[in-house]
Image: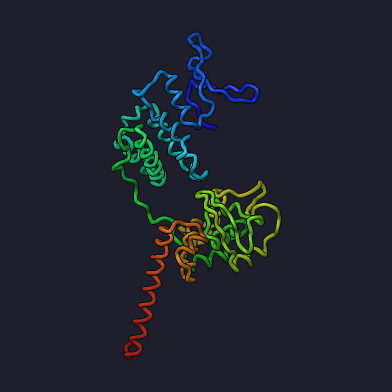
Amino acid sequence: MVELPKGVHRVVSRGREYFYWSPDRGTKRAAKAIRLPSDPTDPNFWIALRAAQGQDGTQILTVNDVIDRYVTSPKFTKLTKGTRDMYAKPLKILRAGFGDWNASKMRPNHLREVIEGMADMPGAANNLLSVARAFSAWGVARDYFSQSFTDGVEGYEKSGGHKPWTDKQLAAAEQKLTGMVRRGFFLLRYTGQRGSDVVRLGETFIDDGGFRLEQQKTGREIWCPIDDALAAEMATWERVPGPYLRHSRGTYSRKVLDVHFAEQRENIPELAGCTLHGLRGTRVVELRRAGLTTTQIQDQVGMSLAMIERYCRFADKKASGKASVVSLKERRRQNGEN
């Protein structure tokens, strides 16, 4: 359902929806209600609403007004559900901070003050800036904003992100993780999928020796082969209907898996600093070592080409460095050097 502005009322009669502009409804000031189009997701609904409000081409749109239009626009509704959900909190912050402001008065300095005030939450600040950029560009293109209110606003430097696990860390996890955390580790380790997708996996996702799924965040459909090591581990699991990851109160969520992993990690020194999301990069590096091309890795993991190249570039440099050391030692041996 679209969130309707204050003063717009929805009426259901004989199974049909009707919308009216009646800001003073139920009071002595109430005037005759003005009928609006029946589809709030249609831009004509909002045009009619502005006309009913007595506004014309010189209307003053608030930031809330623009957000209302944005979240019902084809640009927004065509985004995947995961992306729309990710946009929700940043848009809520913009409503809280600037909702009643004249949209044409928005300037980069206003957003910069908010971003700088979130120094203790750099990740959330960067997410806000990212969503604000998309929203601002959309609004500028439609003359809702007189200029971009994100130009020149800088985010926070990333601390390196979720680092791929080392061979030593992978071995420690296989030896010491238990229960559903162990299951989650193997699924993440050998599929390279996000936690939000791994917690959904079950027998019904298996198709011809692999997992076929539509990623929640991107909407991309992928087929991920089940590695022999994962198949061997899965053979030890009790087969029951539903997702592989579950507990007494039902299925796991990504956040629950993260919490339970953090609890076990406390007792495994080798895993200090490891994150489950880091296993996504781990799988990319492993597939690269196995000789897969960037495109083949993308088909299997569903990661952007840019991110795959980033992980592989580091792995290739590391492999090249090790090869040069071996070559130097061999040359010294042939020359009779110590």
Q: Considering depth in this image, is 268 or 251 the residue closer to the camera?
A: 251
Residue, x 35% and y 30% (percent of image)? Answer: 103
State whether residue 262 appears in this view: no
Residue, x 42% and y 28% (percent of image)? Answer: 65
Q: Position of residue 157 (x, y in %)?
A: 34, 51
Picture quarter containing residue 190?
bottom right
Q: Considering depth in this image, is 306 or 328 the residue closer to the camera?
A: 306
Image quarter hosting the N terminus: top right
Q: Considering depth in this image, is 282 or 220 the residue closer to the camera?
A: 220
Q: Position of residue 110 (x, y in %)?
A: 31, 34
State whether residue 105 appears in this view: yes
Q: Residue furthest top?
A: 28
Indicate left or right for 288 with 263 as reference: left
Q: Position of residue 29 (x, y in %)?
A: 48, 10
Indicate left or right for 69 with 26 as reference: left
Q: How is the image coloured?
A: rainbow
- In this picture, is 248 found above or below 68? below
Indicate left or right for 101 with 175 as reference: left
- In this picture, is 134 found above or below 11? below
Residue, x 46% and y 70% (percent of image)? Answer: 289
Count every numbered label the image shows and give the total.
Answer: 0
- In this picture, is 47 found above or below 75? above
Picture quarter containing residue 60?
top left
Q: Position of residue 239 (x, y in %)?
A: 70, 58
Image quarter hosting the C terminus: bottom left
